[in-house]
Image (cartoon, rainbow, N blue to C red):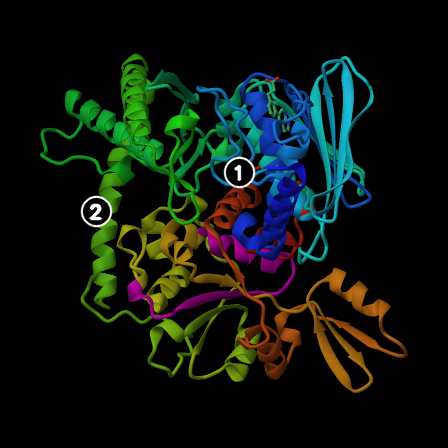
């Protein structure tokens, strides 16, 4: 093929990416936009995990670009067999890769890994600078991956490494504003996963900068998550290698009741778990039950612990590195490890190391066995209580008086019905008046919701507010939760757009995450997005969702106008509330994802923990986090 034919093919390929960006990066909203950053960073991380370079810098610049630089080997700068330079191939050919030797690990190409060329296709400009073989080379692209200036030597350098700067294309993305918080959260995670790697994130617009570096990797990660909890022992560190799979796990039990297991494969989070997580859980259950049997802790009773008993209060990070050749992902979002040998590898290493640890540390062993045994007792009691609750009777056989404040929907098609959980009785009143009576039900909530981060199933059952929610939804909780039993297709949290409202949102999301995960997994949990302002120009009134939108809108108004900032839902009348926030035709709902929920849980522990300092910091930094980015899908 002649060079020209090749370059036409390439442009067709990149054009396809621009036509259907969603196919490559999932979406063109904030999430999709950040995908571009992950894609470029993953390449840099690949170099680091294979031992090349230990500093990665990410910079958000004043011109709206992101710069990612690494100290890896540098992209090779020779001529490729196609006639193009190798950098041109890497940044313009879809799925061009092939740099990896057998046995090397790679992030890119695994979970998302659509390649740097996709980022180029979705950028109005991209500049790649390479230090290699004593020289500095540069190539630049414009208008979605068209070569602007071909690769050329621009100087000399003793260093090696690659720097990529790109400007996302505004005609493709709904927003091109990067979130410093989102990038930091993810980079901190990568720094935990790769010992001795330093990641610096700089925001030149707001003049702030953070550097992440951890000597104790996963142990530091677990300690970070448990920052505001009370650990029962020193974090257990498990390392090993089997079937060519490198295993690294840190685990620690706390006095809380939540289970917090986060797993990674080649440094990419596996949201839906997979074989490595299954191997981990299987091993723990087996170790616990053997320990209990050997030490006669169940006093001869012929029962055993369930898996969930052995994970109550557990924080664990599982990180495995699986070689390319046997790497398999499953599920719609490819967030689940499929590689079968990862199960056996993790299971046998954890079984061996954890059994040994417990035998060597009897006092720790007794503490955590005791906790697991208590969990078993509580679980059995709670199941009984739930069964009674489901039958609508309490212990004494009397009908339970609950969901008294619920205003029901009249429609019979459950899947079309929506439940609004509304902050405060006054907003509840407006919602009740303004709603669509057929499909919308209103349940007003009084003040703060119980913090479920430390709550046991018994605590939940004893809490009236949460009990009302559970019964109203009618689909059970925990292992008994069944989305098909839900009385509503959508559960929508509607709070004021202020601090307290955000607080209630995280508490509720945490409750659902811990006790009705299935509701989130099935995409049934939402957050309503009330407008921040109304804007009156002459006789017309419009509603504005964000500060950014307001300042844009103001620029285009000629003549007089009046702005009103809504301080809470209660300031809107019932028609206004319906029109802006509840009416399916106009409203914009935020669907809560599992990822959001995990962040929310971490936030709850920061917000509600005993330490004052992190809480202050957190509130200062995240006043409007729900609107900013983290809850948006
Ligand atoms: C192809 C081959 C080699 C390295 C790379 C690409 C490479 C790509 C990126 C992207 C961002 N940073 C990067 N660093 C390196 C291997 C080159 C060799 O064997 O020396």
Across and down, in percent, residue 115 comes to 57, 38
Q: Which residue is mark 2?
A: 380
Can you say which quadrant of the picture contains the C terminus? bottom right
Across and down, in percent, residue 344 comes to 27, 26
Residue at (52, 22) in percent of width and height: 217
The residue stretch that appears in magenta: 484-510
Q: Of discs 2 and 1, which sits in the foreground?
A: 1
Whether residue 486 is in magenta: the answer is yes
Q: Is residue 101 above or below residue 594?
A: above
| Ligand 1 located in image quadrant | top right
Image quarter for residue 88?
Answer: top right
Q: Is residue 550 above or below residue 46?
A: below
Secondary structure under tag 2 reads helix
Q: Is residue 203 above or below residue 359?
A: below
| Relative depth, front residue between 85 and 488 | 85
Q: Are marks 2 and 1 in contact (CB under 8 Å)?
A: no
Can you say which quadrant of the picture contains the N terminus? top right
Sort mark 2 into few (<14), some (14-19) or many (20+) by Cα contacts within 10 Å.
Answer: few
Residue 155 appears in the figure:
yes
Residue at (23, 52) in percent of width and height: 383
Image quarter for residue 401?
Answer: bottom left
Residue at (48, 53) in percent of width and height: 593
**Marks 2 and 1, how far apart at CA:** 44 Å
Across and down, in percent, residue 146 comes to 72, 44
Mark 2 or mark 1: name the one nearer the start of the chain: 1
| Relative depth, front residue between 539 and 359 | 539
| Relative depth, front residue between 292 and 545 | 545
Checking the image for residue 113, the label placed there is 1
């Amino acid at each position: 093929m002649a060079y020209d034919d090749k370059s036409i093919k390439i442009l067709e390929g990149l054009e396809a990416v621009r036509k259907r960006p969603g196919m490559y990066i999932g979406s063109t909203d904030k999430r999709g936009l950040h995908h571009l950053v992950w894609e470029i960073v993953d390449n840099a991380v690949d170099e680091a995990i294979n031992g090349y370079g230990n500093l990665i810098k990410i910079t958000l610049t004043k011109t709206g670009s992101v710069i990612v630089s690494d100290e890896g080997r540098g992209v090779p700068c020779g001529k490729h067999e196609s006639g193009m330079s190798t950098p041109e191939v890497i940044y313009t050919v879809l799925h061009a890769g092939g740099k990896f030797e057998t046995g090397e690990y790679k992030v890119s190409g695994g979970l998302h890994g659509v390649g740097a060329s996709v980022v180029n296709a979705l950028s109005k400009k991209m500049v790649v600078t390479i230090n290699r073989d004593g020289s500095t080379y540069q190539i630049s692209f414009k208008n979605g991956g068209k070569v602007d200036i071909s690769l050329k030597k621009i100087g000399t350098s003793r260093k090696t490494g690659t720097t990529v700067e790109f400007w996302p294309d505004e005609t493709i993305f709904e927003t091109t504003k990067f979130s410093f918080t989102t990038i930091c959260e993810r980079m901190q995670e990568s720094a935990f996963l790769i010992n001795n790697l330093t990641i610096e994130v700089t925001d030149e617009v707001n003049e702030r900068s953070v550097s992440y570096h951890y000597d104790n990797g996963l142990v530091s990660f677990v300690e970070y998550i448990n920052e505001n909890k009370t650990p029962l022992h020193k974090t257990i560190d498990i390392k090993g290698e089997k079937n060519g799979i490198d295993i690294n796990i840190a685990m620690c039990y706390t006095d809380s009741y939540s289970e917090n297991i986060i797993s990674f494969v080649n440094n990419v989070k596996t949201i839906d778990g997979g074989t490595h997580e299954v191997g981990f859980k299987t091993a723990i259950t087996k170790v616990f039950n053997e320990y209990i049997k050997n030490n006669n802790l169940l006093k001869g009773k012929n029962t055993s612990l369930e898996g969930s008993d052995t994970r109550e209060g557990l924080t664990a990070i599982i990180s495995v590195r699986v070689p390319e050749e046997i790497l398999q992902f499953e599920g719609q979002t490819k967030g689940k490890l499929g590689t079968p040998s990862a199960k056996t590898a993790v299971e046998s290493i954890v079984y061996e190391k954890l059994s040994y640890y417990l035998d060597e540390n009897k006092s720790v062993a007794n503490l955590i066995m005791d906790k697991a045994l208590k969990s078993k007792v509580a679980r059995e009691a709670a199941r009984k209580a739930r069964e009674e609750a489901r039958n609508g009777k309490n212990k004494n056989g009397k009908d339970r008086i609950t969901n008294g404040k619920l205003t029901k929907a009249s429609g019979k098609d459950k899947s079309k019905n929506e439940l609004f959980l509304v902050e405060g009785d006054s907003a509840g009143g407006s919602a009740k008046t303004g709603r669509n009576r057929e499909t919308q039900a209103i349940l007003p909530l009084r003040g703060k919701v119980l913090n479920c981060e430390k709550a046991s199933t018994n605590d939940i059952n004893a809490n009236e507010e949460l009990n009302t929610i559970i019964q109203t939804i009618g689909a059970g909780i925990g292992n008994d939760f069944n989305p098909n039993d839900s009385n509503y297709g959508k559960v929508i949290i509607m709070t004021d757009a202020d601090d307290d409202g955000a607080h209630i949102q995280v508490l509720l999301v945490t409750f659902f995450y811990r006790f009705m995960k299935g509701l989130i997994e099935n995409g049934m949990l939402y957050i309503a997005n009330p407008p921040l302002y109304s804007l009156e120009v002459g006789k017309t009134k419009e509603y504005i969702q964000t500060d950014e939108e307001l300042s844009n809108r103001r620029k285009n108004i000629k003549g007089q106008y009046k702005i009103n900032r809504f301080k809470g839902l209660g300031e809107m009348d019932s028609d206004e509330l319906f029109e802006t926030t509840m009416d399916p035709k106009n409203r914009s709902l935020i669907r809560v994802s599992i990822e959001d929920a995990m962040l929310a849980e971490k936030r709850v522990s920061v917000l509600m923990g005993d330490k004052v300092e992190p809480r202050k910091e957190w509130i200062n930094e995240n006043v409007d986090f729900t609107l900013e980015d983290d809850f948006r899908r």
